[in-house]
Amino acid sequence: MLDYFLFGLTAVLGVVILIYLASKKKMDRRVEALEADIRRYAEVVARMADVQSKTFEKFSIRFEEIDERVLELSVPSQDPEMPLEKRHQVLSLAKRGVPLEEIVERVKAPVGEAELILNLRKFQQGLKGAPAPKQTEARVS
C-alpha cells in the first residue's frame, strides 16, 4: 500500500513540476515579448524627442529671423515721437553696425535714450536663459 502511495505522490509531483515548467516557459516568453515592446517604445520615444528638438530649433531660428525682419522693416514716420518705432529704429540701426552717434543723429533721439534702448535689449537677451528674478516684498515700518 505504501508503494502505491509513493507512486501516486511521485506522479502528482511530476505533474506539478511539468505544469510549473510549462507556465514558466510561457511566462519567460511573455517577459521577452514585453521587453521587446519596451525597447520598441523607447526607440519611438527617442525618435519623437529628436523630431521635437529639431522642430524647436527650426522655429527658434525662424522667430529670430522674423524679429530681425521686423526691425529691418520699421520705417521712420513723420512723427519722431513714436516711442515704439524709435526703439525699433535704434535697434535696427545698431544691428547693422551703425555707431551710436550716427543712430542718435538719424533717429533724432537723445544719446541717453538710445543707450537705454540698446542696454535694455542686451539685458533682455541676457535673461532669455536665466530664471525669473524673485520678487521681494517691501517692508512697511
Image (spheres, grey):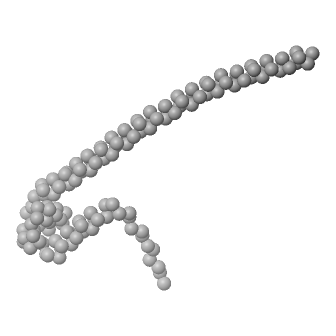
Pick the residue in front: 7 or 100: 7
Would you say residue 108 is visible in this rendering? no
Would you say residue 73 is visible in this rendering? yes
Query: Where on the picture, by quarter, is residue 106?
Result: bottom left
x and y percentages locating residue 46 in the rendered image:
39, 40
Residue sitting at x 16%, y 64%: 91
x and y percentages locating residue 40 in the rendered image:
44, 33
Q: On the rendered structure, is 51 left or right of 12?
A: left
Residue sitting at x 19%, y 51%: 66
x and y percentages locating residue 49 in the rendered image:
37, 42
Tell me the quarter of the image containing the N terminus.
top right
Residue sitting at x 45%, y 74%: 137
Query: Where on the picture, by quarter, is residue 51?
Result: top left
Q: On the rendered structure, is 18 left or right of 76?
A: right
x and y percentages locating residue 136 in the rendered image:
44, 73
Q: On the rendered structure, is 96 left or right of 131?
A: left
